[in-house]
Image (cartoon, rainbow, N blue to C red):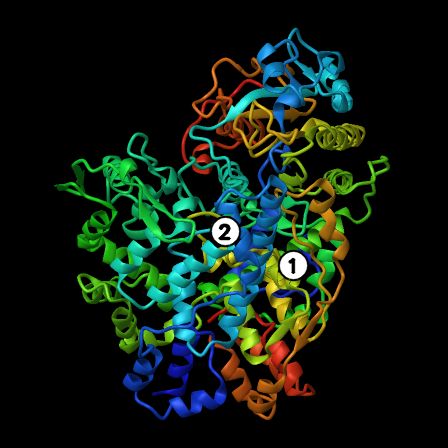
Amino acid sequence: METKHVQHLFHRAGFGILPSKLLSLSKMSRKNVVTGLVPKTKKFQKLQLELSGMEAMVKDATKGRLSKPQRKELQRLSREKLKEYNAAWIHRLVHTQEPFREKMTLFWANIFVCRDNHIFHAQQFNNILREHALGHLGDFLKAVAKAPSMSKYLNNRQNIKEKPNENFARELLELFTLGEGNYSEQDIKEAARAFSGWSFRPNGDFYLRQKKHDYGSKTFLGERGNFDGDDIINIILKQPQCARYICKKVYRYFVHPEINEDHLKEMEGVFYGSYDIAKLMQHVFMSDWFYEKEQHGSKIKSPIELLVGIQKIVPIHFMKKKQQLYLQRIMGQVLLYPPNVAGWKQNRNWIDGNTLLFRMKLASVLLNDAVIQVSEKGEFEDSFEAYYANTRKRGKKLNIERDWSIFSQEYVSLDRQSLRSYLIQAQIDKDTLLFLDTLTQLENKEYMVQLMSIPEYQLC
Amino acid sequence: MKRRKFIQQSSLASGALFVPHFLKAVEKDGTALTGTSEKRLVIIQLSGGNDGLNTIIPYTNDIYYRSRPKIAIPSTDVLKVTDNLGFHTSLKPLMGLYDKGYLTILNNVGYPNPDRSHFRSTDIWHTASKSNEYLTTGWIGRYLEEYGKKAFTAIEVDDSLSLMLKGEHTNGIATKNAKLLFNNVNTPYFKKILNKQTDQHLSEHNLGYLYKTMIEARSSAKYIYETSRTTQSKKDYPDNPFGKQLKTTAEFINSGLATKVYYVSMGGFDTHANQLGAQSRLLEIYGKAMAIFLDDLEQNGSLDDTIIMTFSEFGRRVGENASKGTDHGTANQVFIMGSQLKKAGFYNQGPDLLTLDNNQDLTYTVDFRSIYATLLERWLGVPQENILRSSFTTLDFI
């Protein structure tokens, strides 16, 4: 496999690749490299915090044994833990042995979008994404539909036969599977009835509140029967539009922001019916068109891709976890805190003058102690003082520790051109290249920071 | 005209800033700016959801007092302005504006199927979407795309840009310190990168978009800084961050920046607990700063061309909660301020507490997008359709 192709593959299917691994994989065939990406077993490593200290409290809470201040304290603790989980997730992205599964997990987190302050449920949901990321779409949807976090986020818990709540049914069709215009308002109503009574136990297990479930006959997308939620999902999967909708998302995320209709058709053909996600991805990565030049560096990195990409070379330990949250907030993507059920908008939507200036400075901030000049906005829930409190923090350096060992092993003695080609996916602008050539005095460390600060580094 | 010469003559890009060929059109637009209208709009968000019922108080309404045994404002404390409505005492500074005919209050502003999440409802107000619709651009971003083109056409007086000011290809710019922003795009490194840009080999794809955004940010930062650097407000704004934001806004406006829209958000209004003291302080901060702001603009001859709209993403529930606060609600007031108001005072009736929705919340009678439509058509002088993606009845307040 061509070196450039391996590099492209690993930027899309992961967060980059180290030079030594790149060289060894370049000696292999495309088939072997792609097969090697896909996990061999269904086993995966859950992402979990140590929460034993909270378990008793949660149990008491569900039994109604906590006073109001205690419940408040539990909620506060849970929100704190969620921030830790954010850091743990980023740590996982940087250090994982299964970058492809993690990249897929990140992808799905922006399709089946959910937000939950309940740390136990949030973890459960996150691991559902991880478990099914390369599995069967139908199983995946059914697991998502039954997850407590989703049930709360889209009000399915309030969906009872006497008074159906359509929120989950609507987003299932509009945002998770078919897209607007491929179902009627009546389909939403009927689907909502099928999901009525779907609830969960305090331990997070699904359970059907039989008295609240509507067992009656429903007509959904032209079929008639006493459907429940699983049946609704099965009927959705029968629609070729469902395969098309998901393939479009995959194409924009993994191949190119603009759809090529021929490539899409091919993917739909592979995906429809089997709904085998791993098979679909393997097909994409085996296709010649995936490696065409126009795909290289065609995507604007998400803030997380940017943050993780830098850390793949120089892992960073944040002494204050708040500071990594701050970086995410300023760039517009805080993991576990999506803006709404439609998720982050991606590609050019990441970029405005302010975010771009910050993103181009990120490498200096992380690797060179550059001072941060901007402060994040306060939160809606903040008091007046708290809302503006961050302003005072402006002009500070991050409190971090860097691990230069990977850099020292892999990058420090590379020649200029190799360093450049390993770091930059896009074709570098000619004038910028001229500028880079003037930087003859720099050590590789500084040269790398410069490379990470050019607009081309924003692309992958 | 030689390119170099053109650039030197352009008011926006003095010095040796070279611009890739395909971007020339972008740079040129800057000289044409935003058409003939000199009018500008300042938008203020009371972030967190201000409690409208304790802001403009229905002091003769029994239901109001029954629903809020602990936190209703006693009628004796109300600054009464009509037979049944009056201001919170902290808003005394606004009374002056009210008496001068510089304030219009629109009651019960909201939208169908209200969303009670801060995030979502703010998105809805920022994008002018329906409540079940997710848009990627803000209403001011879309205005900018059609009419201003340059980033400085819409400034958020803060460090990061909100959805309201984001367009599909063009965005506004955020700054609360023009010098700092200017310095950020004038680092030796930034200069070097951009000064090397001499030709047209940039693609129209994402890389070209990045370079265009960089160049645009730099030229806007330079324009804002160089235009506004010598203007300093002589007014004594309250010494708090909101006062500072408004002072900066006034300096931008009074310096003659060609900016059409300013956006400022003031935080702290999510008063779930012990609301009385907290809200009283917030309204005092808001009222004082606003009165000085209008005064500042008026004395500098800028007020006749400025309209200020204040909104909150939602109002709060009619009934108080158990923590002497209020939870997220629905319809709320919008304040319009300026010297060119057609209908000053109360534009419409206060809230009808007898006819609540099925969640026991206020029902809206004015769609917020009607206000946007009015500001676009009657103030900024542009048709609403492309920006609001629909047509709303304009209102008679300007």
Q: Report the residue marked by disc 1.
A: B218
**In front of the other: A46 or A284:** A46
**In front of the other: B355 or A267:** B355
Q: Residues within 10 Å of mark 2 (few under 14, many from 20)?
A: some
* Badge 1 element: helix
**In front of the other: B179 or A174:** A174
Q: Give the mark toward the camera: 2 or 1.
A: 2
Task: Tell me where residue A163 sits by quadrant.
Answer: top left
Q: Specify whether residue B149 is in view.
A: yes
**In front of the other: B226 or A25:** A25
Instruction: Give me the chain letter of mark 1.
Output: B
Q: Report the residue marked by disc 2.
A: A59
Task: Tell me where residue B45 sits by quadrant.
Answer: top right
**Vertical placement of residue A186 versus A124, above or below:** above
Instruction: Give me the chain letter of mark 2.
Output: A
Residue type at tag 2: Lys
Relative to A443, is A268 on the left or the right? left
Residue at 67 percent of width and 22 percent of height: B70
Q: Are marks 2 and 1 on the same chain?
A: no
Relative to A359, is A115 on the left or the right? left
**Vertical placement of residue A282 versus B226, above or below:** below
**Vertical placement of residue B186 versus A63, above or below:** below
Q: CA distance from mark 2 to mark 1?
A: 56 Å
Across and down, in percent, residue B185 comes to 68, 62
Q: Specify whether residue A431 is in view.
A: no
Across and down, in percent, residue A452 comes to 59, 74
